[in-house]
């Protein structure tokens, strides 16, 4: 039953994120027009790369920190 609640919650978040994404996309088309798609695509690609590099660095730091913690063996 607990797993079912988690799955339902994930589905709600998934549908909500699609609606938010679609709404933002429509707003960008309305206010910026179709003529600016290439510059916004480039900005999006750059931001994606920066975000992925940041996440990769933070995950690597977290994994390295966990490796340095000594474990007590009995």
Image (cartoon, rainbow, N blue to C red):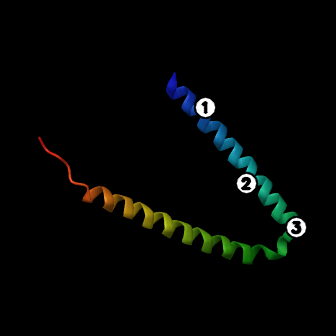
Q: CA distance from mark 3 to mark 1?
A: 35 Å
Q: At 84% across and 65% down in the image, what residue appears? A: 29
Look at mark 2 in the image and give the residue it sits on: 21
Residue 54 located left or right of residue 36:
left
The disc, 3 or 2, on the residue closer to the chain's N-terminal end is 2
Image vertical order of residue 72 relative to residue 1, above or below: below
Helix, strand or loop under label 3: helix
Residue 26 appears at what percent x and percent y? 82, 58
Helix, strand or loop under label 1: helix
Q: CA distance from mark 2 to mark 1?
A: 20 Å
Is disc 1 surrounded by few (<14), some (14 to 19) or many (20+) residues within 10 Å? few
Residue 33, visible in the rendered structure:
no
Look at mark 3 in the image and give the residue it sits on: 31
Quarter where residue 44 is shown: bottom right
Viewer-proximal residue, 73 or 10?
73
Residue 19 appears at what percent x and percent y? 75, 47
Q: At 13% across and 44% down in the image, what residue appears? A: 73
Look at mark 1 in the image and give the residue it sits on: 8
Q: At 54% across and 26% down in the image, what residue appears? A: 4
């Amino acid at each position: 039953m607990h797993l079912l609640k988690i799955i339902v919650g994930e589905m709600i978040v998934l549908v909500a994120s699609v609606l938010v994404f679609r709404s933002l996309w429509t707003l960008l088309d309305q206010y910026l027009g179709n003529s600016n798609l290439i510059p916004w695509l480039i900005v999006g690609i750059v931001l994606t790369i920066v975000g992925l590099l940041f996440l990769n660095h933070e995950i690597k730091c977290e994994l390295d920190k966990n490796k340095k913690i000594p474990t007590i063996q009995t």
